[in-house]
Image: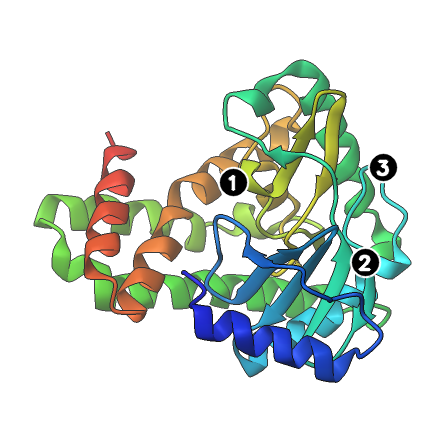
Amino acid sequence: MKISESRRQDLRQMIAVTWPDFPLHQETLVPLQPQGWDYDSVSIGPWVLRAGRSQASRCHLQYEMAKLETMNLPIPTPRYQWRSNWGGIYQRLPGVPASSDEIQRPDLQFALSEFVSALQRPEHLPRRFDPVRCHRHWRLRYQQLWNEINEWIVPLLSMKQHRYIAGRVRELLGSEEHFRWNPVLLHGDLTPGHILLTPEGIGGIIDFGDMMTGDPALDWASWAAGEMPPEFEERAEFYRWIAPAYGVLRSLAHGSVEQAETALGRWIKLWR
């Protein structure tokens, strides 16, 4: 998603009205790349603004800002110093987004395993937490995803491709073994693009817009090579495999047919 010039001007005006003491001056609002679907992210000099695009994303951002403030993690995360009901501003973390190849370095793998293990400590779960309810919602989450795939993506597939994708989803939803895990707090989208690298190592972890409770294997799926606990491997492989479906569905939902075709083509190549 791109940020239009009119949206940038709107954000500048919202900042000026909401935080009159913020040092905006003549700073340029530079969109960060890549942009997600749910938030506008722009750099303002040494600062980063995240603004929700919908009521749901703005609500989740309130949770994200408050939760990050309470956790002491081994890798820096955003600390929002300016907050409102529509967005927040934090001091930009050092580094540039990692690539999939870079993240395989043993030192980075170790650092990320330390980060994920710390994030998933039991004390970070909500105070009133029901694991049975979490398991039920997790199953429903992937059942709903499968329903959306059936409605929007399956009509674009051959019969052979349909059978393959249906079989993979049934492997997860049909096995009780895949739901015998202790729920934990998750980053939810710990892909290389949200891991900032400096010459010294990892400068920060960003974009907690999908923070939730669920299967601990999810946060290992996008980056782990040798550090993943063996019992997570099968489920993590499934999460890696199905992740591109979200990009296809969101492209279709926003009318980006060309982007959807490209995303679907990349996903199908993973099936071979």
Outermost residue toward the top in this view: 106
Depth-wise, is mark 1 or mark 2 nearer the camera?
A: 2
For label 3, the SS is: loop
User: Considering depth in this image, is 151 or 132 the residue closer to the camera?
Assistant: 151
Proximity of marks 3 and 1: CB atoms separated by less than 8 Å: no
Where residue 17 is drawn, which disc sits there?
none
Depth-wise, is mark 3 or mark 1 nearer the camera?
A: 3
Would residue 205 appear left or right of 170 to someone viewing this image?
Answer: right
Where residue 235 is drawn, which disc sits there?
1
Would residue 148 appear left or right of 33 to someone viewing this image?
Answer: left
Say if 223 sits above or below 169 in the image: above
Residue type marked 1: Arg
- Measured as percent of width and height from the top left, residue 15 is found at 69, 76
Q: Residues within 10 Å of mark 3 (few under 14, many from 20)?
A: some
- In which quarter of the view is residue 152 placed? bottom left
Specify whether residue 265 is in view. yes
- Quote the CA–CA distance across marks 3 and 2: 13 Å
